[in-house]
Image (spheres, rainbow, N blue to C red):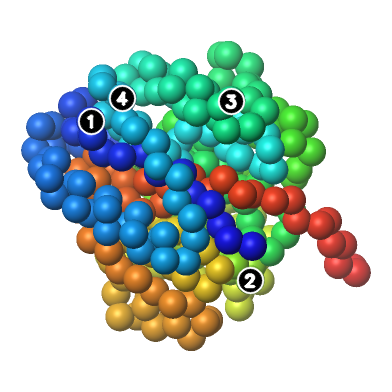
Amino acid sequence: MTDRYLMCAPDHFDVSYVINPWMQGNVAASCNDLAWRQWDALADAISGVASVERLSGEAGVPDMVFTANAGLVLQNIVVLSHFRHAERQPEEAHFEKWFSEHGFRVVRLAPHLAFEGAGDALLDRGQDLLWMGHGHRTSVECAPELAGLLDIEVEPLRLVDERFYHLDTCLCPLEGGYLMYYPQAFDEASRARIAARVPAARRIEVAEADALDFACNAVNSGRHVFLNRASGELAHALAARGFTLRQMPLGEFMKAGGAAKCLTLKLNELRRLKVRTAA
Ligand code: ARG
């Protein structure tokens, strides 16, 4: 099946406020022309292996380009995001409109909870499991709510480094049940939970330099992986596991704290069959 991704054009992309450390010192410092070229290159590359649905940006919401934060999709349901920061909350209505017009059933969590969609909630690619990041943006109380709403097991992971404020900046489930992640972004208990859920042979640990290059913020469709930049060591680790890597510079978006994965939302998220392994 061909994967489908939602991307929002950077018509109104800019760094206009500071809500994460990457934006510090970058207000009004991004170049819209270059952002467009980088975005087009990513959209074209993904279109080579999957289909891309494009949505126009809206004035006044410069971060809307990061569609990963629109919501969490599972089958035809989308759990709409409710952003922690007031600056991004006006995006919610725009994304809700798009989802309703495109056949999704839109559901919401309790209004007092912050939830930042597929930026913090990532489906594992080897088991019926949802990884959920908390500590910066998404409220920890979202975990039982998502579990009940979607009838899926949720593994909460505590993020402890403010540079990695969304789960998708430091962890990426890959086809075949692999998990690429930067361990130091998590507290010790969360690292232990990852190790308990994913066998060592399926874990791809990323070094700090790669993490800071947003290597974990990767788009994975089948055997294809698209990301900003990877060291020779990481590129080798991915190739050894059968992945074809495309490195695409996304520096203008990194000034806002996002890269490849943040710029996309996978729309065809199907349920995995619950497979029980013998004890
Ligand atoms: N400036 C945006 C924010 O801080 C960047 C969002 C990046 N998205 C992501 N899924 N990590 O909210």
Badge 1 marks a residue whose secondary structure is helix
Q: Residue at x 66, y 42 (%)?
A: 74
Q: Earlier in the sequence, mark 3 or mark 1?
A: 1
Circle 1 residue:
12
The crowd level at tag 3 (other Cα within 10 Å; few <14, some 14-19, many 20+) is few
| Ligand 1 image position (quadrant) | top left
Q: Residue at x 19, y 33 (%)?
A: 14
Circle 4 residue:
58
Q: Earlier in the sequence, mark 2 or mark 1?
A: 1
Q: Earlier in the sequence, mark 3 or mark 4?
A: 4
Circle 3 residue:
100
Q: Residue at x 27, y 64 (%)?
A: 248
Contact, mark 1 vs mark 4 (Cβ under 8 Å): yes
Circle 2 residue:
176
* Quadrant of residue 231 within the rendered picture: bottom left
Q: Which image quadrant: the C terminus?
A: bottom right
- Closest to the observer: 157 or 176? 176
